[in-house]
């Protein structure tokens, strides 16, 4: 980064090359639509580039863009489905995954995707933002135009439904 702290074109290219798949995956969880997810990432990158002077050096560029991408996905959902929210799939990141672990993660993704599909739109988005994106209830409430109590109730209902939907799964230890 240059001495003023504003990200350079090279900084953006590095972030894109290493993190764009994660941004897309996060946006896909929200939009449930590959085209909207791709649009959200594109919108986020354009927005981040245009507002790069607002970037704070205490943050990581890829994390800053990730947050902008999530907001872009939520905005696209608001435009395409006013009053409705959705989320889909889980993504797991690991550098040292055995074929067996990869297969189990794929199975878990499928199970989680099916379980998430049984949630209401608000429950899905609140769950994804809270547990997969690590947002605070206050942040989710502000972003979705809800109060914190509604967010906490939606997350609680989502967790309860997911436990019921996924009760058949066992935790296994890997040696």
Image: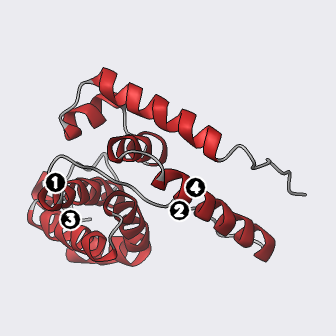
Q: Secondary structure at mark 4?
A: helix
Cα gap from disc 1 to disc 2, whole angstroms: 23 Å
Labels 1 and 4: the sequence-earlier one: 1
Labels 1 and 3: the sequence-earlier one: 3
Residue 91 is labelled as 2
Of discs 1 and 3, which sits in the foreground? Answer: 1
Of discs 2 and 3, which sits in the foreground? Answer: 2
Q: Residue at x 10, y 59 (%)?
A: 51
Cα gap from disc 1 to disc 3, whole angstroms: 16 Å
Which is more toward the observer, 66 or 119? 119
Q: Residue at x 14, y 52 (%)?
A: 82
Cα gap from disc 1 to disc 4, whole angstroms: 24 Å
Q: Report the residue marked by disc 3.
A: 44
Residue 108 % position (x, y): 66, 60
Q: Report the residue marked by disc 4.
A: 112
- Viewport quadrant of the N terminus: bottom left
Res 97 seen here: no
Residue 43 % position (x, y): 17, 69
Q: Report the residue marked by disc 1.
A: 78
Q: Secondary structure at mark 2?
A: loop
Q: Residues within 10 Å of mark 1 (few under 14, many from 20)?
A: some
Q: Secondary structure at mark 3?
A: helix
Q: Residues within 10 Å of mark 4 (few under 14, many from 20)?
A: some
Cα gap from disc 2 to disc 4, whole angstroms: 10 Å
Q: Residue at x 53, y 59 (%)?
A: 113
Tell me if 69 is positioned left or right of 154 in this view: left
Q: Secondary structure at mark 1?
A: helix
- In the rendered image, the vertical position of residue 153 relative to residue 162, given as above or below: above
Res 87 seen here: yes
Q: Residues within 10 Å of mark 3 (few under 14, many from 20)?
A: many
């Amino acid at each position: 980064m240059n001495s003023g702290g504003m990200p350079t074109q090279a900084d953006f290219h590095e972030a894109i090359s290493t993190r764009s798949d994660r941004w897309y995956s996060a946006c896909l969880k929200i939009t449930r639509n590959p085209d909207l997810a791709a649009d959200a990432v594109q919108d986020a990158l354009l927005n981040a580039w245009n507002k790069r002077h607002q970037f704070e050096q205490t943050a990581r560029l890829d994390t800053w863009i990730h947050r902008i991408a999530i907001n872009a996905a939520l905005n696209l959902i608001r435009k395409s489905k006013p009053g409705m929210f959705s989320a889909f799939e889980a993504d797991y990141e690991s550098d040292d995954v055995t074929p067996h672990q990869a297969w189990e993660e794929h199975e878990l993704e499928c199970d989680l995707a099916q379980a998430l599909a049984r949630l209401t739109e608000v429950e899905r988005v609140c769950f994804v933002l809270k547990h997969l994106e690590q947002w605070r209830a206050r942040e989710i409430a502000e972003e979705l135009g809800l109060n914190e109590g509604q967010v906490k109730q939606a997350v609680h209902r989502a967790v309860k439904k997911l436990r019921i939907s996924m009760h058949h799964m066992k935790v296994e230890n890997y040696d």
